[in-house]
Image (cartoon, grey):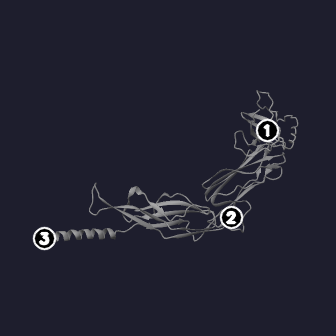
Amino acid sequence: MRISLRLPLLFLALLAGAARGAEGAAQPSLRLRLDPDQPAYWAGQRVRCTLELDLAGAELGGGGRLSVGGIPESGASIDVGPFAPAAPSAPGRRAWASEVSLLAPGAAVFEPSVSGTLQRPRPGNTGFFRQYSIEGFSASADPRRIVARPLPEEGRPADFCNAVGSFVFDASLAPRECAPGDILTLRWTLHGRGAELGREVAWDPGPGFKAYPPRVEERGDGLLSVSQVVVPLSTNAVSAAPFAVSVFDPAASRYETHRAGPFALRFVERTPVEEDPVPAIPAPAPGKAAPATTVPEAGGGAAAPGDHLAIPALAPARLAPAAGAKVLFEIPAGTAVRVREVRGAWLRVLLPDGSSGWISSPSP
């Protein structure tokens, strides 16, 4: 009788010991790291945010899926990118990192937490067929308030392009051998680590040039590429002025200016072509449409060198620096142009101010 009582008591004691062992197992802990780690940041600065989970000797269950909370949502003043796996600081840990862009002055509070399931090997289980216990967990990191202060007004250059970060600068002007009226293109880029880049900066090449507005060719993650078309109006424009653009370096807490140029030009002689004056196109009377585009019938109705074209009011032509290039700007309605060269569906035309460019061939 005594033996039959001792067996149930021994079984209950074993269960209680296993429960105490599970309760006493170390639980996962979460840590938030910022790079750079500073008391305050600059508006426009980009910060790397890393979540590191110490698994306390366990393994992630459920296929490694986690629920993450306490991360500010992207908005007008902050942009939080997706978290991707990153290298942990020690074995037995898992890490995920994201780039946080502080788009405007203000503050954001990070209170990250993760939850999921763990699997632990049961004591005494060895060999190929190991058994695991499955348990849920939740871990939270210490809250962190991230403050972004406005960029300093003192010392801000007029050519500041709203780029904040560390960048490599490059600029070129081509072609450098040209004739008056040719289209030259300045291209400059900033590439590096930085927040969303702001605006393009207009370049003034100096007297003797006609400059058109700059346009953004590419804007991406830490990349800004801008082009600007200028036209030398005479052989006296033998040099174009230097180009400069400024950025803000958050590590040094100061503005930095990148420069290129001046750009020396070499003018080449071209065989002159005698041309009739470009005819003036009268403005339309009030309430009436402008004259339609006129293309002579020579060559099966296609435009040919020497032809005059009048740009219609309802469908203005668009000028580009090269055949097939992207649109740069519109030619005002009623402008008279002369065809200089034909290349497929593109026409190189001479404008009344002496500059030239390419337009897509209008319909006859």
**How far is mark 1 from mark 2, CA to CA?**
43 Å
Give x and y (percent) for residue 207: 83, 52
In the rendered image, which quarter is residue 364 located in? Answer: top right
Mark 2 nearby-residue class (10 Å; few <14, some 14–19, many ≥20) = some
Q: Mark 1 belongs to which amino acid?
A: Val
Q: Nearer the viewer, residue 96 or 362?
A: 362
Q: Residue at x 86, y 44 (%)?
A: 286
Give x and y (percent) for residue 97: 50, 60
Helix, strand or loop at mark 3: helix
Helix, strand or loop at mark 1: strand
**How far is mark 1 from mark 3, CA to CA?**
111 Å
Q: Nearer the viewer, residue 70 or 222?
A: 70
Q: Earlier in the sequence, mark 3 or mark 2?
A: 3
Q: Mark 2 belongs to which amino acid?
A: Tyr
Give x and y (percent) for residue 339: 80, 35
| In the image: residue 164, left or right of residue 293 | left
Q: What residue does disc 2 label?
A: 255
Q: What residue does disc 3 label?
A: 3
Q: What residue does disc 1 label?
A: 349
